[in-house]
Amino acid sequence: MGQKVIQIEGPDGSGKSYLAQALIHDFKAAYIHVSNYPEKKQTILQHEPMMAFGDDWAHKRDLSPVVLDRHWLTLFVYSMIFDNQSDQVRVLNFIGEHLQQWRQIADRIVFCLPPKQEYLTRFEKIKSERPELYTDMSKVYDAFWALYYGKRLDNPVCHTLLGRWLMSNGGMATWPNVRLYDYTQHLEDFDNREPADWAKENLL
């Protein structure tokens, strides 16, 4: 991609959109999500054309960075926890084939991981306010936590070869382009200035 790319990953309700809004408002970011990608297909085949679309869309509108709200990492986590076995194999093979390429595409990969108990409490509130496709985020949270910190848990993600590889050598926290974001630190910032300041210091 020709534009700077920020890839935001994490469980539902963990602050991905909260951070993306700061990037859009303060830095003219192009926001790419399944919901505003024209094909709108929830399949593993969407990811490469989604990146190409994002690059072209941002370039034509003179927008940068390009924010990818969920990409291969979230696909991997959710597929291993919720999909059937045949879908899991397809996802693992697809990501495995492209992982080295995708590691280099994002200038920054953001893990949205607030403290677990606070996150789960807030997610229960979110469910009462809007419909959610998945209702139990505990295993999803644990998978992201394990991948970031390199700590194996009794979790479907941790039992895959890809999961073990991602957790090796201290987890993805050791990757130079990975950052950890906790939106709960900015909840009292009603002008949304602190997320923008954090993004400027850590992502741009």
Image (tube, rainbow, N blue to C red):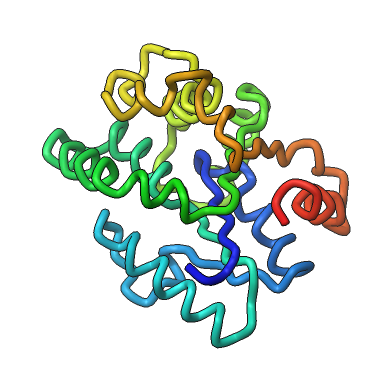
Determine whether, in the image, residue 138 is placed left or right of residue 119.
left
- Toward which corner of the image does residue 63 lie, by quadrant? bottom right
Q: Residue lying furthest left in this view?
A: 86
User: How many labels were placed on the picture?
Assistant: 0
Q: Residue at x 87, y 49 (%)?
A: 189
Picture quadrant of residue 184: top right
Q: 165 above or below 33?
A: above
Q: Position of residue 148 (x, y in %)?
A: 53, 27
Q: Residue at x 37, y 12 (%)?
A: 154
* Residue displayed at 41% across by 28% down: 166
Quadrant location of the C terminus? Answer: bottom right
Q: Nearer the viewer, residue 31 or 135?
A: 31
Vertical position of residue 66 compared to residue 197: above or below: below
Vertical relation: 26 (above or below) 167: below
- Reply above or below: 39 against 21: below
Q: For the point 58% across and 29% down, which residue is it?
A: 173
Q: Position of residue 111 (x, y in %)?
A: 58, 39
Residue 130 in picture, x, y percent from top left: 54, 52
Please tell me in which quadrant of the rendered image residue 126 appears. top right
Nearest the viewer among 140 and 195 is 195
Left or right: residue 149 compared with residue 201: left
**Image x and y of residue 7, in percent:** 54, 52
